[in-house]
Amino acid sequence: MSVAGWNTIESDAGVFTYLVDNLGVKDVQFEELVSLDAEHLRQRSPVYGVVFLFKYPTGEKSQEKPLDGTYDYEAAESHFFAAQTIQNACGTQALLSVLLNKTDGIEIGSRLQEFKDFTGAFPADLRGEALSNSELIRDVHNSFARASPFADEAQRWATEEDDVYHFIAYTSMGGKLYELDGLQPAPISHGSCSPNEFPDKVIPVLQRRIERYPAQEIRFNLLAMVQDLRIRARELGDQDWLEQEEQKRIAWQWENALRRHNFIGFIGEMLKGVVGTKLSEGGGRYQEWVEEAKNRTKSSLEERRNAAGEQVS
Protein backbone atom coordinates (compact mmCIF):
# COMPACT_ATOMS: atom_id res chain seq x y z
CA MET A 1 0.00 0.00 0.00
CA SER A 2 1.01 3.57 -0.58
CA VAL A 3 2.66 5.17 2.41
CA ALA A 4 1.51 8.79 1.93
CA GLY A 5 -1.53 8.36 -0.31
CA TRP A 6 -5.13 7.36 0.24
CA ASN A 7 -6.03 3.74 -0.38
CA THR A 8 -9.33 2.32 -1.53
CA ILE A 9 -11.74 1.17 1.18
CA GLU A 10 -14.90 -0.88 0.85
CA SER A 11 -18.44 0.38 1.11
CA ASP A 12 -19.17 -1.76 4.15
CA ALA A 13 -21.16 -1.04 7.31
CA GLY A 14 -18.50 -2.57 9.57
CA VAL A 15 -15.70 -0.61 7.90
CA PHE A 16 -17.50 2.73 8.17
CA THR A 17 -18.72 2.10 11.72
CA TYR A 18 -15.27 1.41 13.10
CA LEU A 19 -13.67 4.09 10.92
CA VAL A 20 -15.72 6.83 12.59
CA ASP A 21 -15.25 5.12 15.96
CA ASN A 22 -11.47 5.29 15.51
CA LEU A 23 -11.79 8.98 14.64
CA GLY A 24 -13.34 9.55 18.06
CA VAL A 25 -17.04 9.67 17.12
CA LYS A 26 -19.42 8.34 19.77
CA ASP A 27 -22.62 6.28 19.39
CA VAL A 28 -22.80 6.14 15.59
CA GLN A 29 -23.05 3.13 13.32
CA PHE A 30 -23.79 2.35 9.69
CA GLU A 31 -26.46 0.02 8.38
CA GLU A 32 -26.62 -1.32 4.83
CA LEU A 33 -29.96 -0.71 3.14
CA VAL A 34 -31.02 -3.43 0.72
CA SER A 35 -34.17 -1.66 -0.49
CA LEU A 36 -35.27 1.90 -1.20
CA ASP A 37 -38.02 1.91 1.37
CA ALA A 38 -38.71 4.95 3.54
CA GLU A 39 -40.31 2.93 6.32
CA HIS A 40 -37.35 0.54 6.42
CA LEU A 41 -35.05 3.54 6.80
CA ARG A 42 -37.27 5.23 9.39
CA GLN A 43 -37.14 2.16 11.62
CA ARG A 44 -33.47 2.98 12.22
CA SER A 45 -34.18 6.52 13.43
CA PRO A 46 -32.54 8.75 14.29
CA VAL A 47 -31.03 8.71 10.77
CA TYR A 48 -28.30 11.30 10.35
CA GLY A 49 -27.77 10.75 6.63
CA VAL A 50 -26.96 8.19 3.96
CA VAL A 51 -23.81 7.43 1.97
CA PHE A 52 -24.45 6.31 -1.61
CA LEU A 53 -21.95 4.42 -3.78
CA PHE A 54 -22.50 4.30 -7.53
CA LYS A 55 -20.67 3.87 -10.81
CA TYR A 56 -19.42 7.28 -11.83
CA PRO A 57 -20.19 8.25 -15.45
CA THR A 58 -16.65 9.11 -16.57
CA GLY A 59 -17.82 10.13 -20.03
CA GLU A 60 -20.41 12.58 -18.75
CA LYS A 61 -19.71 16.23 -19.52
CA SER A 62 -19.90 18.82 -16.77
CA GLN A 63 -23.00 21.02 -16.80
CA GLU A 64 -23.88 24.41 -15.41
CA LYS A 65 -26.86 22.93 -13.55
CA PRO A 66 -27.19 19.59 -11.77
CA LEU A 67 -29.42 16.96 -13.37
CA ASP A 68 -31.59 17.00 -10.25
CA GLY A 69 -31.92 19.73 -7.65
CA THR A 70 -30.19 23.12 -7.56
CA TYR A 71 -26.76 24.30 -6.47
CA ASP A 72 -26.76 26.17 -3.16
CA TYR A 73 -23.56 28.18 -3.03
CA GLU A 74 -24.51 29.84 0.25
CA ALA A 75 -24.72 26.41 1.91
CA ALA A 76 -21.12 25.77 0.83
CA GLU A 77 -20.12 28.65 3.11
CA SER A 78 -22.54 28.18 6.00
CA HIS A 79 -22.13 24.39 6.30
CA PHE A 80 -19.23 21.99 6.03
CA PHE A 81 -18.65 21.25 2.35
CA ALA A 82 -15.27 20.19 0.95
CA ALA A 83 -14.16 19.76 -2.64
CA GLN A 84 -12.63 16.38 -3.41
CA THR A 85 -8.99 16.98 -4.29
CA ILE A 86 -7.53 13.47 -4.10
CA GLN A 87 -8.39 9.99 -5.34
CA ASN A 88 -9.77 7.23 -3.09
CA ALA A 89 -10.81 9.61 -0.30
CA CYS A 90 -14.44 10.06 -1.36
CA GLY A 91 -15.83 7.39 1.00
CA THR A 92 -14.38 9.02 4.10
CA GLN A 93 -15.17 12.48 2.72
CA ALA A 94 -18.82 11.50 2.25
CA LEU A 95 -19.26 10.29 5.82
CA LEU A 96 -17.46 13.35 7.16
CA SER A 97 -19.85 15.53 5.14
CA VAL A 98 -22.65 14.12 7.28
CA LEU A 99 -20.80 14.00 10.61
CA LEU A 100 -19.43 17.54 10.49
CA ASN A 101 -22.89 18.93 9.72
CA LYS A 102 -24.55 17.04 12.59
CA THR A 103 -22.47 18.18 15.54
CA ASP A 104 -25.62 19.32 17.35
CA GLY A 105 -26.73 15.69 17.63
CA ILE A 106 -23.50 13.70 17.34
CA GLU A 107 -20.46 13.77 19.60
CA ILE A 108 -17.70 13.84 16.97
CA GLY A 109 -14.80 13.99 19.43
CA SER A 110 -12.14 16.59 20.04
CA ARG A 111 -9.93 15.79 17.04
CA LEU A 112 -12.67 16.11 14.42
CA GLN A 113 -14.05 19.17 16.20
CA GLU A 114 -10.61 20.79 15.97
CA PHE A 115 -10.49 19.97 12.25
CA LYS A 116 -13.94 21.47 11.70
CA ASP A 117 -13.07 24.62 13.66
CA PHE A 118 -9.76 25.00 11.81
CA THR A 119 -11.36 24.73 8.35
CA GLY A 120 -14.56 26.60 9.20
CA ALA A 121 -13.60 29.81 7.38
CA PHE A 122 -12.01 28.04 4.40
CA PRO A 123 -13.58 27.87 0.95
CA ALA A 124 -14.51 24.39 -0.32
CA ASP A 125 -11.28 23.82 -2.25
CA LEU A 126 -9.07 24.62 0.76
CA ARG A 127 -11.22 22.44 3.01
CA GLY A 128 -10.63 19.61 0.54
CA GLU A 129 -6.89 20.23 0.64
CA ALA A 130 -6.94 20.31 4.44
CA LEU A 131 -8.85 17.03 4.54
CA SER A 132 -6.51 15.31 2.10
CA ASN A 133 -3.49 16.50 4.12
CA SER A 134 -4.87 15.43 7.50
CA GLU A 135 -2.59 12.67 8.78
CA LEU A 136 -5.15 11.65 11.40
CA ILE A 137 -8.00 11.14 8.93
CA ARG A 138 -5.77 9.58 6.26
CA ASP A 139 -4.15 7.12 8.66
CA VAL A 140 -7.48 5.97 10.07
CA HIS A 141 -8.90 5.69 6.54
CA ASN A 142 -5.94 3.64 5.31
CA SER A 143 -6.10 1.31 8.29
CA PHE A 144 -9.28 -0.18 6.76
CA ALA A 145 -7.85 -0.76 3.29
CA ARG A 146 -7.36 -4.34 2.21
CA ALA A 147 -3.75 -5.50 2.52
CA SER A 148 -2.12 -6.28 -0.82
CA PRO A 149 1.35 -7.63 -1.67
CA PHE A 150 1.27 -5.75 -4.95
CA ALA A 151 1.71 -1.98 -5.03
CA ASP A 152 0.76 -0.07 -8.16
CA GLU A 153 2.03 3.49 -7.91
CA ALA A 154 1.00 4.37 -11.48
CA GLN A 155 -1.78 6.93 -11.72
CA ARG A 156 -3.76 7.98 -14.79
CA TRP A 157 -7.01 9.65 -15.62
CA ALA A 158 -9.98 7.30 -15.90
CA THR A 159 -11.48 6.71 -19.35
CA GLU A 160 -15.02 5.83 -20.41
CA GLU A 161 -14.00 2.15 -20.47
CA ASP A 162 -12.98 2.15 -16.80
CA ASP A 163 -15.33 1.20 -13.97
CA VAL A 164 -15.00 4.11 -11.56
CA TYR A 165 -17.06 4.28 -8.36
CA HIS A 166 -17.85 7.32 -6.28
CA PHE A 167 -19.31 8.04 -2.83
CA ILE A 168 -21.67 10.92 -2.08
CA ALA A 169 -23.77 11.81 0.95
CA TYR A 170 -27.32 12.99 1.58
CA THR A 171 -28.39 14.68 4.79
CA SER A 172 -30.82 17.28 6.11
CA MET A 173 -29.35 20.54 7.33
CA GLY A 174 -30.79 24.01 7.73
CA GLY A 175 -34.27 22.73 6.92
CA LYS A 176 -33.30 21.35 3.51
CA LEU A 177 -32.28 18.03 1.96
CA TYR A 178 -28.78 18.28 0.54
CA GLU A 179 -26.66 16.12 -1.72
CA LEU A 180 -23.00 16.52 -0.75
CA ASP A 181 -20.65 15.55 -3.55
CA GLY A 182 -17.05 16.77 -3.45
CA LEU A 183 -16.86 16.65 -7.26
CA GLN A 184 -19.61 19.27 -7.55
CA PRO A 185 -19.05 23.02 -7.07
CA ALA A 186 -21.55 23.31 -4.20
CA PRO A 187 -24.10 21.33 -2.17
CA ILE A 188 -27.18 20.39 -4.21
CA SER A 189 -30.49 21.30 -2.61
CA HIS A 190 -33.45 18.96 -3.10
CA GLY A 191 -36.00 21.10 -1.30
CA SER A 192 -37.26 21.49 2.23
CA CYS A 193 -36.60 18.67 4.67
CA SER A 194 -36.58 18.31 8.44
CA PRO A 195 -34.63 15.52 10.15
CA ASN A 196 -37.90 13.65 10.77
CA GLU A 197 -38.85 13.95 7.10
CA PHE A 198 -35.48 12.76 5.85
CA PRO A 199 -36.44 9.08 5.17
CA ASP A 200 -39.45 10.13 3.10
CA LYS A 201 -37.63 12.89 1.21
CA VAL A 202 -34.34 11.14 0.39
CA ILE A 203 -35.79 7.92 -1.09
CA PRO A 204 -37.41 9.58 -4.16
CA VAL A 205 -34.16 11.47 -4.85
CA LEU A 206 -32.19 8.22 -4.77
CA GLN A 207 -34.75 6.53 -6.99
CA ARG A 208 -34.48 9.28 -9.60
CA ARG A 209 -30.71 9.02 -9.57
CA ILE A 210 -30.75 5.24 -10.05
CA GLU A 211 -33.26 5.59 -12.88
CA ARG A 212 -30.64 7.47 -14.92
CA TYR A 213 -28.80 4.17 -15.37
CA PRO A 214 -29.69 1.25 -17.64
CA ALA A 215 -32.10 -1.24 -16.08
CA GLN A 216 -29.39 -3.92 -15.91
CA GLU A 217 -27.09 -1.74 -13.81
CA ILE A 218 -27.25 -3.01 -10.23
CA ARG A 219 -23.90 -1.91 -8.84
CA PHE A 220 -25.10 0.44 -6.12
CA ASN A 221 -24.61 0.45 -2.38
CA LEU A 222 -26.45 2.48 0.24
CA LEU A 223 -25.39 2.88 3.87
CA ALA A 224 -27.40 4.74 6.49
CA MET A 225 -25.63 6.62 9.26
CA VAL A 226 -27.71 6.06 12.39
CA GLN A 227 -27.45 6.14 16.16
CA ASP A 228 -25.81 3.07 17.66
CA LEU A 229 -28.69 0.57 17.59
CA ARG A 230 -27.57 -0.92 20.90
CA ILE A 231 -28.77 2.27 22.59
CA ARG A 232 -32.32 1.75 21.32
CA ALA A 233 -32.21 -1.94 22.25
CA ARG A 234 -31.19 -1.08 25.83
CA GLU A 235 -33.89 1.60 26.10
CA LEU A 236 -36.53 -0.92 24.99
CA GLY A 237 -35.11 -3.68 27.17
CA ASP A 238 -34.92 -5.93 24.08
CA GLN A 239 -32.20 -8.41 25.04
CA ASP A 240 -32.52 -10.42 21.81
CA TRP A 241 -31.97 -7.31 19.70
CA LEU A 242 -29.09 -6.20 21.92
CA GLU A 243 -27.42 -9.60 21.59
CA GLN A 244 -27.89 -9.49 17.83
CA GLU A 245 -26.20 -6.09 17.65
CA GLU A 246 -23.34 -7.23 19.90
CA GLN A 247 -22.76 -10.27 17.68
CA LYS A 248 -22.79 -8.00 14.64
CA ARG A 249 -20.03 -5.90 16.20
CA ILE A 250 -17.94 -9.00 16.90
CA ALA A 251 -18.32 -10.10 13.27
CA TRP A 252 -17.37 -6.64 12.02
CA GLN A 253 -14.23 -6.58 14.16
CA TRP A 254 -13.21 -10.00 12.86
CA GLU A 255 -13.77 -8.97 9.23
CA ASN A 256 -11.84 -5.72 9.73
CA ALA A 257 -8.94 -7.64 11.27
CA LEU A 258 -8.84 -9.97 8.25
CA ARG A 259 -8.72 -6.97 5.90
CA ARG A 260 -5.48 -5.82 7.49
CA HIS A 261 -3.67 -9.09 6.85
CA ASN A 262 -1.97 -10.25 3.68
CA PHE A 263 -2.34 -14.03 3.46
CA ILE A 264 -0.28 -14.51 0.27
CA GLY A 265 2.88 -15.37 2.21
CA PHE A 266 1.02 -17.78 4.48
CA ILE A 267 -0.56 -19.57 1.52
CA GLY A 268 2.79 -19.81 -0.26
CA GLU A 269 4.50 -21.31 2.79
CA MET A 270 1.64 -23.76 3.30
CA LEU A 271 1.87 -24.96 -0.31
CA LYS A 272 5.62 -25.37 -0.04
CA GLY A 273 5.17 -27.44 3.09
CA VAL A 274 2.55 -29.72 1.49
CA VAL A 275 4.59 -30.17 -1.70
CA GLY A 276 7.74 -30.85 0.34
CA THR A 277 5.92 -33.56 2.31
CA LYS A 278 4.72 -35.29 -0.85
CA LEU A 279 8.16 -35.14 -2.44
CA SER A 280 9.76 -36.62 0.67
CA GLU A 281 7.47 -39.65 0.43
CA GLY A 282 9.16 -40.64 -2.85
CA GLY A 283 8.01 -43.45 -5.10
CA GLY A 284 6.15 -41.14 -7.44
CA ARG A 285 3.78 -40.14 -4.67
CA TYR A 286 3.96 -36.46 -5.63
CA GLN A 287 2.92 -37.11 -9.23
CA GLU A 288 0.09 -39.39 -8.07
CA TRP A 289 -1.13 -36.65 -5.76
CA VAL A 290 -1.15 -34.12 -8.59
CA GLU A 291 -3.08 -36.48 -10.90
CA GLU A 292 -5.62 -37.22 -8.16
CA ALA A 293 -6.20 -33.48 -7.71
CA LYS A 294 -6.65 -33.01 -11.46
CA ASN A 295 -9.18 -35.85 -11.64
CA ARG A 296 -11.18 -34.48 -8.68
CA THR A 297 -11.27 -31.04 -10.28
CA LYS A 298 -12.37 -32.52 -13.62
CA SER A 299 -15.14 -34.54 -11.94
CA SER A 300 -16.36 -31.51 -10.02
CA LEU A 301 -16.55 -29.43 -13.20
CA GLU A 302 -18.47 -32.16 -15.01
CA GLU A 303 -20.97 -32.42 -12.14
CA ARG A 304 -21.57 -28.67 -12.28
CA ARG A 305 -22.10 -28.76 -16.05
CA ASN A 306 -24.55 -31.65 -15.73
CA ALA A 307 -26.44 -29.89 -12.94
CA ALA A 308 -26.63 -26.70 -15.01
CA GLY A 309 -27.91 -28.67 -17.99
CA GLU A 310 -30.67 -30.24 -15.91
CA GLN A 311 -31.76 -26.81 -14.63
CA VAL A 312 -31.96 -25.41 -18.19
CA SER A 313 -33.96 -28.38 -19.49
Image: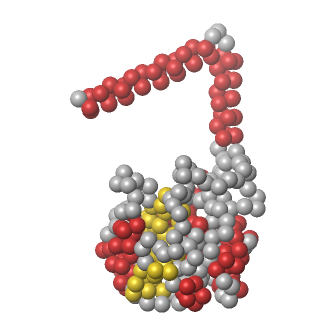
Position above or below: 90 against 187: above
Position above or below: 80 against 299: below
Instruction: Looking at this view, name the residue that lies furthest to the right.
Output: 3
Quadrant for the C terminus in the image: top left
Quadrant of the rendered image containing residue 137: bottom right
Is 217 left, or right, of 184 in this rendering? left
Residue at figure coordinates x 68%, y 89% from the top left: 121
Across and down, in percent, residue 97 comes to 56, 77
Across and down, in percent, residue 245 comes to 44, 68
Quadrant of the rendered image containing residue 198: bottom left
Position above or below: 100 against 313: below
Question: What colour scheme has been applied to the protein in the rendered image?
Answer: secondary structure
Residue at figure coordinates x 64%, y 44% from the top left: 263
Is 271 left, or right, of 211 in this rendering? right
Residue 24 visible at all: no
Instruction: Looking at this view, name the residue that lies furthest to the top.
Output: 283
Residue 215 visible at all: yes
The residue closer to the viewer here, 177 or 249, is 177
Residue at figure coordinates x 71%, y 74% from the top left: 129
Across and down, in percent, residue 183 comes to 58, 70
Across and down, in percent, residue 226 comes to 46, 76
